[in-house]
């Protein structure tokens, strides 16, 4: 039996009458890549935002790294070792690429006000941030303003920042969307390499090919509910999933 | 230097200290404040009351003045920093008007007549006035600038930059928005308190009008003009905005028109301030010394 890192139970998030997430449960094991799939508006990103603390859930429980974490704010989740990227990239536009990563390297410093008065300009911090940039292949852009980078670079910058924070779990929210084909393959290699380093990943992905290839297991959401869970091979053949994506009696072909 | 120049320079140094405080809040942490004069006033009134009514010396009162102003900043910051952008601007304007009204209508603060007979600062039995007081103000300004420099190099300062740039992303990196916005607010208001104390013992008579809303607008103009979030921007902004009206004094009423024109030209051609990103001064400096023109 594998060790469970993230346990989600009967999670619900309602916005007024809209049930964005409506009773979802799943487990994520240590060193696993779990894909979270579903059509537009299925509740994937809301689910992400509840897990990472952006929203408090309407009901349900979340356990992360052995403790109950539902309702904790994002900065507390980060301190527990949960790093995330954003579907709509959120760089610190006026800081350099290197400084963007350095901000995330301070995750342990911000917990304690006194410790946050230490300096971030030392060589060790710089070196660590540089290593992270090398990992995602952005070392050449270290001194550029983050706001000037193209989308593909920004997606990798987000991963570098999330890596500094998420020593336990990475939440990757559609980090392949909007990328060119030649950018997707190296990024997939990067995510695989991250898992080999011992990290666990929860992945929201629209690109079926990417999700199928990267994920160990897949959870499919539709209208805020879990409609399927299993290995990628099982999921593509699941009639319920096919219906959710293509509609009943559809004769179209999958993307 | 004649007395007039020294008086203008002293006032500019004091305004620069207060503007540096505002720069921490607006320039570093990105939280708009249009009520900074309130804290400038709280510092001035606290020091005036402690030295006249309680009979303390300037030096004994100063730590208390800075602490009290920072504490009021904390108490007013807790509710204010819950709102953002335009709403925060309106809230801070409100703070300015309330504080001014308290000075004006609570008899303890001297009402419209204000507080007079504020003693001069003495150091080693020397009463400081004229050039020596200017030097004292400049020493305090240098101290504030050193603290600002240290803050920008601390993780706390970096956390503030991150919050300014993108609050949601900063939260995802372990940065508590409330904690670090409040830290910037307390540091900025305490600095305004220091400036207020220096102002009270410089003018030796203060009244509520000295700390009204237009003063807040002027302080904000200083850091916008000089370069928001830069080390020297508030100092340059204070120097220009304090001395310009004096230089234009012979022009009488037209000087305000000229003054407005200069600000408009600035906004059009140097939107990030005289020392800000991609400003003329920065580009010239970068050409003169390709390396080492950093923060």
Image (cartoon, grey):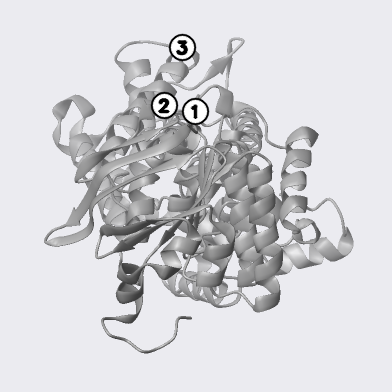
Q: What residue is shown with label 2?
A: A66
Q: Which residue is mark 1?
A: A111
Viewer-nearest residue: A178 or B218 = A178
Label 3: which secondary element:
helix
Residue B246 to residue A126: above or below: below
Q: Tell me which label, 2 or 1, sits earlier in the chain.
A: 2
Q: Is residue A147 left or right of residue A224?
A: right
Specify few, some or many for label 2: CA neighbours under 10 Å numbering under 14, 14-19, or 20 or more: few
Q: Quadrant of residue A200?
A: top right
Which of the two marks, 3 or 1, is nearer to us in this view? Answer: 1
Spatial CA distance of label 2 from label 1 is: 20 Å
Q: Nearer the viewer, mark 2 or mark 1?
A: 2
Secondary structure of the residue carrying numbered label 2: loop
Instruction: List the residue tagged with mark 3.
Output: B60
The residue marked by circle 1 belongs to what chain?
A
Residue at mark 2 to residue at mark 3: CA–CA distance: 52 Å
Tag 3, which chain? B
């Amino acid at each position: 039996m594998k060790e469970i890192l993230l346990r989600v139970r009967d999670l619900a998030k309602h916005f007024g009458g809209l049930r964005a997430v409506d009773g979802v449960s799943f487990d994520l094991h240590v060193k696993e890549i779990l894909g979270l799939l579903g059509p537009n508006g299925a509740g994937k990103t809301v689910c992400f935002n509840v897990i990472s603390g952006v929203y408090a859930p309407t009901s349900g429980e979340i356990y992360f790294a052995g403790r109950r974490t539902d309702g904790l704010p994002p900065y507390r989740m980060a301190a527990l070792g949960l790093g995330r990227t954003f579907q709509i990239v959120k760089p610190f536009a006026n800081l350099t690429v290197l400084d963007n990563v350095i901000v995330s390297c301070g995750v342990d410093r911000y917990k304690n006000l006194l410790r946050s008065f230490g300096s971030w300009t030392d060589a060790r911090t710089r070196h660590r941030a540089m290593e992270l940039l090398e990992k995602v292949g952005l070392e050449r852009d270290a001194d550029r303003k983050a706001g000037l980078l193209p989308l593909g670079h920004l997606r990798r910058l987000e991963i570098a920042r999330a890596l500094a924070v998420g020593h336990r779990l990475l939440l990757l929210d559609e980090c392949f969307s909007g990328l060119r084909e030649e950018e997707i393959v190296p990024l997939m290699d990067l995510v695989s390499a991250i898992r080999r380093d011992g990290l666990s990943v929860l992945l929201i992905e629209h690109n079926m090919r990417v999700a199928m290839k990267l994920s160990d297991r897949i959870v499919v959401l539709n209208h805020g509910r879990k409609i399927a869970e299993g290995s990628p091979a099982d999921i593509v053949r699941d009639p319920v999933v096919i219906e959710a994506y293509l509609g009943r009696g559809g004769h179209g072909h999958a993307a | 230097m004649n007395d007039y120049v020294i008086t203008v320079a002293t006032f500019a140094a004091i305004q620069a200290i207060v503007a540096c405080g505002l720069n921490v809040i607006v320039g570093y942490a990105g939280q708009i404040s249009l009520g900074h004069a309130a804290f400038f006033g709280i510092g001035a009134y606290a020091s005036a009351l402690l030295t006249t009514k309680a009979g303390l010396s300037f030096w004994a009162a100063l730590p208390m003045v800075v602490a009290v102003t920072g504490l009021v900043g904390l108490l007013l910051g807790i509710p204010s920093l819950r709102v953002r952008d335009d709403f925060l601007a309106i809230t801070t304007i409100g703070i300015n008007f309330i504080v001014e009204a308290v000075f004006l209508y609570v008899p303890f603060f001297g009402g419209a007549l204000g507080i007079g007979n504020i003693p001069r600062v003495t150091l080693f039995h020397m009463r400081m006035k004229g050039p020596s007081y200017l030097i004292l103000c400049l020493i305090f300004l240098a101290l504030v600038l050193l603290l600002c420099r240290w803050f920008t190099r601390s993780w706390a300062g970096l956390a503030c930059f991150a919050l300014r740039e993108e609050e949601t992303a900063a939260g995802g990196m372990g940065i508590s928005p409330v904690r670090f916005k409040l830290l910037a607010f307390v540091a900025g208001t305490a600095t305004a308190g220091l400036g207020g104390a220096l102002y009270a013992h410089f003018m030796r008579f203060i009244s509520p009008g000295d700390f009204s809303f237009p003063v807040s607008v002027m302080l904000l103009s200083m850091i916008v003009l000089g370069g928001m979030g830069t080390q020297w921007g508030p100092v340059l902004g204070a120097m220009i905005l304090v001395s310009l009206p004096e230089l234009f004094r012979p022009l009488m009423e037209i000087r305000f028109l000229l003054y407005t024109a200069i600000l408009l030209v600035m906004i059009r051609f140097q939107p990030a301030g005289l020392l800000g990103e991609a400003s003329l001064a920065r580009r010239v400096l970068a050409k003169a010394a390709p390396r080492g023109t950093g923060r």
